[in-house]
Image: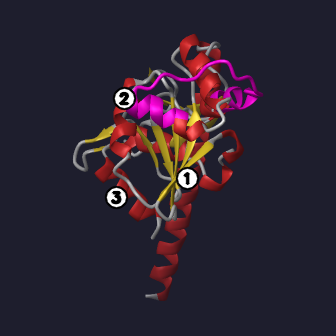
Amino acid sequence: MMIFKRLMLALAAATGLAMATGALADEAAIRKNLAERLPRLPAIEEVTASPVPGLYEIRVNGSEIFYTDAQGNFLIQGNVIDTKAQRDLTEERIARLTAVAFDALPIKDSFTIVRGNGKRKVAVFEDPNCGYCKRFERDLQNVDNVTIHMFLYPILGQDSADKSRAIWCAKDKAKVWQDYMVRDTAIPQGANCDVSALARNVEFGRKYKITGTPTLIFADGARVPGAISSAQVEQLLSAASK
């Protein structure tokens, strides 16, 4: 019996070594073949086996995901969906790669809105010309006991940049922002100030692939793109505070 156990352990070790060696060979082939055949493809930063047998994930530009076979003969751009679990595996992977630790947010480049005791926290990236953001802001009025770190994120054109500058330079940023987004009050013009924070916000968003507004980041690092309801915000705030 002892000899049998030793044989099984040796076999398992040999199998593991063979699999690791095979994976390294596959990675080398993928890197070599794709670099030669697709010279315009950005440098491959990581090659990993995907949950789909025979399919490898390649990562470029920090968080861009492609898929390929073991020899790099085919390149697939798109999302892998787990139909049994009803999960978008590609979206989940990108979310992990682009996760932002709340403590790492450049809070100095935002302004703050405090409601109630302000104990719960959320950061929001918004463009003043975003219709979904206006709808979201109006529903967000129903959420209490929260501190909102508002990052102006003008990505919809020059008018967005102009409005963001006027809001940022206002004496009471939070009031001007809410008056405009919630009550359709015109933004006061004429004030001048240092608006370099707006450029830093856009650069930060590009780095972390914030491609749409609104985008919310909660204290536990959960990131949510899109105009979710106040009830959903409440759920995520509660989850983050546990």
Q: Residue extending furthest right?
A: 194
In front here: 195 or 76? 195
Secondary structure state at the residue bearing disc 2: helix
Instruction: Please check the rendered image and state whether residue 181 is part of the magenta-colored stretch, yes or no.
Output: yes
Residue 154 at x, y percent in the picture: 57, 23
Q: Image quadrant for the C terminus? A: bottom left
User: Looking at the image, what colour scheme do you see?
Assistant: secondary structure
CB under 8 Å between callouts 3 and 2? no
Disc 1 marks which amino acid? Ala
Q: Earlier in the sequence, mark 3 or mark 1?
A: 1
- In the image, is residue 20 above or below residue 48? below
Classed neighbour count for the residue bearing mark 3: other residues with Cα under 10 Å, few (<14), some (14–19), many (≥20): few
Residue visible at 53% across and 39% down? 175
Classify residue 56 as left or right of residue 198: left
Q: CA distance from mark 2 to mark 1?
A: 53 Å
Q: Name the disc covering residue 18, or none.
A: 1
Q: Name the disc covering residue 235, or none.
A: 3
Residue 36 at x, y percent in the picture: 64, 16
Q: Which residues are magenta?
A: 176-202
Secondary structure state at the residue bearing disc 1: helix
Secondary structure state at the residue bearing disc 3: helix
Q: CA distance from mark 3 to mark 1?
A: 47 Å
Residue 227 visible from this viewpoint: no
Q: Which residue position holds label 2? A: 132
Classed neighbour count for the residue bearing mark 1: other residues with Cα under 10 Å, few (<14), some (14–19), many (≥20): few
Count of numbered badges drawn on the protein: 3
Front disc: 3 or 2: 2
In front here: 12 or 220? 220
In front here: 241 or 161? 161
Q: Earlier in the sequence, mark 3 or mark 2?
A: 2
- In the image, is residue 79 above or below residue 231? above
